[in-house]
Image (cartoon, rainbow, N blue to C red):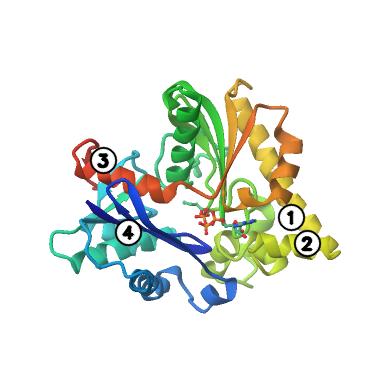
């Protein structure tokens, strides 16, 4: 079985080719802020990212022959986890999605490329809208605004399962805090196999991140919305796209920021330390969901490669539970293996309605 995996992230496009469970190609194409800022909307990046996938396959002499294409994404209605075949209802919801995110392109590109190959099927798995929140976690101080979650469901779960396998225990028997440190940051409380509390990483909840604003002072936000200085679109971008590190420092590139700090840029140091401080506070808040009984804290995502970030984070959170670091992500393998399991009849193929 040949599977093409497409994972458009906020700062990268990741591509993999699997032959059954063996990776034949894994590529991570990074995008600069400048490169992506020439597109007014994420959806406008469709042709650009699709062509990158095709070029990469050509450059690596991989024939365009697949049994299935799986994309990461997208931001659909809240749904249970699992594998979904792309259908018209899904494409329609993605094209009219209230929330824009690069992962919406994963579903669209997978679907478009699959139509070029007779018999090839398009799928998504564990999209960012997987919702397993406990009832109590949904309540906010305003009945008008219940909490929702948008998070790195695929990678958090894959890393949690990887940790469980290494400990020779079932993921379903563990209590974990999993923190994905990517272009966006999600902090998930996994209680016996369910993510019972996790922030809405995209839309202004949780720590700020390379690209996201995180939780903002609500009163000031209302004043800004009513100031007439910005359109709705511009304000949304200031929360989920051009916010966080990139708003303060003009880049999402953590190694470049660390170099600036080493060269004496004190402002860069203050901003990066503030992000680490906010991540630690979110992990602290997550710990009380589990009454402090935490088997492990797992740190993953691109920024988990950064010694600067991980060492400072550990200083603040190590007293809570053992901390394990999984730099990067297991998303590509998780997508490929989910689809392989579905094609083999070992996992159900769910229908998006
Ligand atoms: N080797 C590294 N050292 C330090 N930071 C890194 C390294 N590699 C990536 N990063 C940082 O990780 C962040 C991107 O993480 P990641 O690749 O997980 O994000 P993404 O896939 O684009 O978005 P998301 O994970 O939110 O979907 C960037 O800020 C980048 O600078
Ligand atoms: C679904 C991922 C959320 C984010 O990138 O912030």
Q: Position of residue 132 (x, y in %)?
A: 42, 34
Q: Position of residue 151 (x, y in %)?
A: 48, 46
Mark 1: few/some/many CA within 10 Å (<14, 14-19, 20+): many
1 and 4 marks in contact (CB < 8 Å): no
User: Between marks 1 and 4, how big is the CA–CA gap?
Assistant: 33 Å
For the residue pair 301 and 90, the one nearer the viewer reads as: 301
Mark 3: few/some/many CA within 10 Å (<14, 14-19, 20+): some
**Residue found 34% across the figure and 69% down from its top:** 57
| Earlier-in-chain disc, 4 versus 2 | 4
- List the residue tagged with mark 1: 272
- List the residue tagged with mark 2: 268
- List the residue tagged with mark 4: 107
* SS for callout 1: helix
For the residue pair 180 and 263, the one nearer the viewer reads as: 263
Mark 2: few/some/many CA within 10 Å (<14, 14-19, 20+): some
Q: Is residue 129 above or below residue 52?
A: above
Q: Position of residue 278 (x, y in %)?
A: 70, 45
User: Between marks 4 and 3, how big is the CA–CA gap?
Assistant: 19 Å
Residue 344 placement, left or right of 131: left
- List the residue tagged with mark 3: 341
Q: Of circles 1 and 3, which is in front?
A: 3
Report if the beta carbon of the residue with label 4 is closer than 8 angstroms to ligand 2. no
Q: Is residue 237 above or below residue 177?
A: below
Q: Is residue 50 above or below residue 187?
A: below
| Earlier-in-chain disc, 1 versus 3 | 1
User: Between marks 4 and 2, how big is the CA–CA gap?
Assistant: 36 Å
Residue 148 numbered mark, or none: none
């Amino acid at each position: 079985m040949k599977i093409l995996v497409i994972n458009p992230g906020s700062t990268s496009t990741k591509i993999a080719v699997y032959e059954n469970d063996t990776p034949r190609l894994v590529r991570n194409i990074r995008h600069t802020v400048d490169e992506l800022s020439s597109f007014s909307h994420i959806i406008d990046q469709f042709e650009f990212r699709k062509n990158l996938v095709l070029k990469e396959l050509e450059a690596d002499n991989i024939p365009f022959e697949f049994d299935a294409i799986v994309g990461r994404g997208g931001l659909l209605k809240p749904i249970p986890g699992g594998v979904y075949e792309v259908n018209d209802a899904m494409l329609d919801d993605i094209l009219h999605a209230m929330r824009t995110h690069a992962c919406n392109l994963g579903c669209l590109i997978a679907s478009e490329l699959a139509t070029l190959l007779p018999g090839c099927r398009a799928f998504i798995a564990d999209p960012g809208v997987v919702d397993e929140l406990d009832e109590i976690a949904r309540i906010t101080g305003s009945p008008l605004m219940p909490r929702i979650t948008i998070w790195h469901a695929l990678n958090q779960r894959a890393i949690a399962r990887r940790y469980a396998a290494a400990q020779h225990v079932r993921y379903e028997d563990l209590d974990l805090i999993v923190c994905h440190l990517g272009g966006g940051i999600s902090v998930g409380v996994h209680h016996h196999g369910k993510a019972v509390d996790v922030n809405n990483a995209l839309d202004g909840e949780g720590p700020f991140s390379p690209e996201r604003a995180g939780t903002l002072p609500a009163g000031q936000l209302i004043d800004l919305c009513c100031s007439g200085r910005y359109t709705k679109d511009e304000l949304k971008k200031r929360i989920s796209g051009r916010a966080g590190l990139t708003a303060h420092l003009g880049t999402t590139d953590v190694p470049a920021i660390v170099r600036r700090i080493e060269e004496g840029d004190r402002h860069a140091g203050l901003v990066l330390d503030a992000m680490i401080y906010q991540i630690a506070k979110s992990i602290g808040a997550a710990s009380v969901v589990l009454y402090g009984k935490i088997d492990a804290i797992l740190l993953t995502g691109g920024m988990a490669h950064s010694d600067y970030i991980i060492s400072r984070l550990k200083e603040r959170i190590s007293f809570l539970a053992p901390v394990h670091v999984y730099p990067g992500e297991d998303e590509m393998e998780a997508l490929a293996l989910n689809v392989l399991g579905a094609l083999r009849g070992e996992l159900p193929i769910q229908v998006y309605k």
